[in-house]
Image (cartoon, helix red, strand yellow):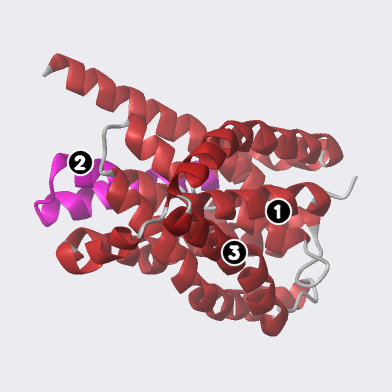
C-alpha cells in the first residue's frame, strides 16, 4: 500500500479541522499580544531548523551516521509548521489555546515560503550523494492545495455556520489520532527492518530535537517573562511539528517520491507524543500541587 493514499486525506482533514477552529479574533491576537506570538513564530520558523541542523552536525562525529535521505527527512520535519494536535495538547496542559491556534495557523501560512527555501538549501547541501532534487514549484502548489485550501474552507464554514463547524470538529478530532496511528502502523510494517536498524541514531536525533526545542520554548518564555499559560503553549508549539505534512512531502510523487525520507517524521511523531504527553502530565501534577 502506498502511504501517500493514507497521508493525503489525513493531512487534508487535519487542515480542514484547523480551519474549523479558527475565528477572526485569533488573528487579532497578533496585534493584541504580539510578544508571545512573535516568540513562538521565531522559535518554530527560525530556531527549530537551526537546532535540527546543529544536532545533525554535533552527532555526526560520534558514529551516529545519518544518510543524506535521513538528513533531508529530519530537516523536513524541522521546517514544517506546527501540528494541529498542539491545540489539544495546549488545552490538556492548561495552556493558552487561543495563542496555540494563532501560532499553528500563522506557521502554516509562513512555512509555505520558508519551507521551500530551507529545503532547497538542504537538498543542495546533501542531495548530491542521492541525486535528490527539490521541485520548488510543485512543493508550493501542493502545500497550497493541501493546506491553504482546506484551512480556508474550514475558516469560512466556521464564520457562517459556527454550530455546524463545532459539530464537524467534534467528529474530526476523534478521527485524527486513530488515522495517524494507522499511518504509523502501515509505515512500520512496510519499512520495519530499516526503522529497527536505524532507530538508535534516528531515535536519539529526534528525541534530542524535541527536548532541545521544547527547552528553547521554555527558556524564551522565561526570559521574556511570559505567563505560565503562554509558556506552556510555547513549549508545546515549538516542540510539536506537523509530521503529517512532512510525510506527505516526502512521499508525494510530485516532490521527493521517497518513503525513506518520511521515516524520520514517523519516529518524530512517536517520540513527540510520548515526550509531550509526559510534559502534560507534569503540568497537571504541578497544578494539583498548587
Is residue 275 something that shows in the picture? yes
Place residue 252 in its image quadrant.
bottom right
Q: Nearer the viewer, residue 27 or 213?
A: 27
Residue on which disc 3 sits? 147
Place residue 106 in its image quadrant.
bottom left
Q: Is residue 290 above or below residue 200?
A: above
| Secondary structure of the residue carrying numbered label 3 | helix
Rounded to the nearest whole Å, what is the CA distance between mark 2 and mark 1? 33 Å
Q: Is residue 205 above or below residue 280?
A: below
In magenta segment, residue 237: no
Question: Which mark is on residue 229?
Answer: 2
Q: Nearer the viewer, residue 203 or 243?
A: 243
Q: Is residue 251 above or below residue 173?
A: below
Residue on which disc 1 sits? 262
> Where in the figure is residue 263, as x and y percent of width and height?
70, 48
> Is the C-beta separation of discs 2 and 3 under 8 Å?
no
> Where in the figure is residue 231, as x and y percent of width and height?
22, 45
Q: Nearer the viewer, residue 234 or 6?
A: 6
Rounded to the nearest whole Å, what is the CA distance between mark 1 and mark 3? 18 Å
Q: Mark 2 or mark 3, which has the lower sequence index?
A: 3
Rounded to the nearest whole Å, what is the CA distance between mark 2 and mark 3? 28 Å
| Secondary structure of the residue carrying numbered label 1 | helix
Identify which residue is drawn at 58% across, 77% down: 116
Is residue 81 something that shows in the picture? no
Question: Which mark is on residue 280?
Answer: none
Main SS of the magenta part reads helix
Amino acid at each position: 500500500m502506498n502511504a501517500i493514499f493514507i497521508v493525503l486525506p489525513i493531512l487534508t482533514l487535519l487542515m480542514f479541522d484547523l480551519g474549523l477552529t479558527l475565528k477572526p479574533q485569533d488573528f487579532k491576537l497578533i496585534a493584541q499580544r504580539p510578544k508571545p506570538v512573535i516568540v513562538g513564530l521565531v522559535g518554530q520558523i527560525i530556531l527549530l531548523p537551526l537546532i535540527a541542523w546543529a544536532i545533525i552536525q554535533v552527532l555526526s562525529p560520534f558514529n551516529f551516521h545519518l544518510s543524506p535521505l535521513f538528513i533531508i527527512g529530519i530537516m523536513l520535519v524541522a521546517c514544517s509548521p506546527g501540528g494541529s494536535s498542539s491545540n489539544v495538547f495546549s488545552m490538556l496542559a492548561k495552556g493558552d489555546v487561543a495563542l496555540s491556534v494563532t501560532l499553528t495557523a500563522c506557521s502554516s501560512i509562513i512555512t509555505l515560503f520558508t519551507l521551500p527555501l530551507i529545503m532547497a538549501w538542504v537538498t543542495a547541501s546533501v542531495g548530491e550523494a542521492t541525486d535528490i532534487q527539490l521541485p520548488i514549484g510543485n512543493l508550493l502548489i501542493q502545500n497550497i492545495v493541501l493546506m491553504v485550501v482546506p484551512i480556508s474552507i474550514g475558516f469560512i464554514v466556521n464564520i457562517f455556520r459556527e454550530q455546524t463547524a463545532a459539530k464537524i470538529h467534534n467528529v474530526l478530532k476523534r478521527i485524527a489520532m486513530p488515522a495517524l496511528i494507522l499511518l504509523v502502523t502501515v509505515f512500520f510494517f512496510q519499512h520495519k527492518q530499516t526503522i529497527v536498524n536505524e532507530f538508535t541514531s534516528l531515535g536519539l536525533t529526534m528525541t534530542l530535537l524535541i527536548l532541545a526545542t521544547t527547552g528553547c520554548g521554555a527558556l524564551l518564555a522565561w526570559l521574556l517573562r511570559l505567563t505560565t499559560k503562554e509558556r506552556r503553549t510555547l513549549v508545546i508549539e515549538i516542540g510539536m511539528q506537523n509530521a503529517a505534512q512532512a510525510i506527505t512531502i516526502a512521499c508525494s510523487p510530485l516532490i521527493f517520491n521517497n518513503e525513506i525520507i518520511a521515516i524520520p517524521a514517523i519516529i518524530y511523531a512517536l517520540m513527540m507524543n510520548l515526550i509531550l504527553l509526559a510534559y502534560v502530565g507534569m503540568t497537571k501534577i504541578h497544578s494539583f500541587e498548587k
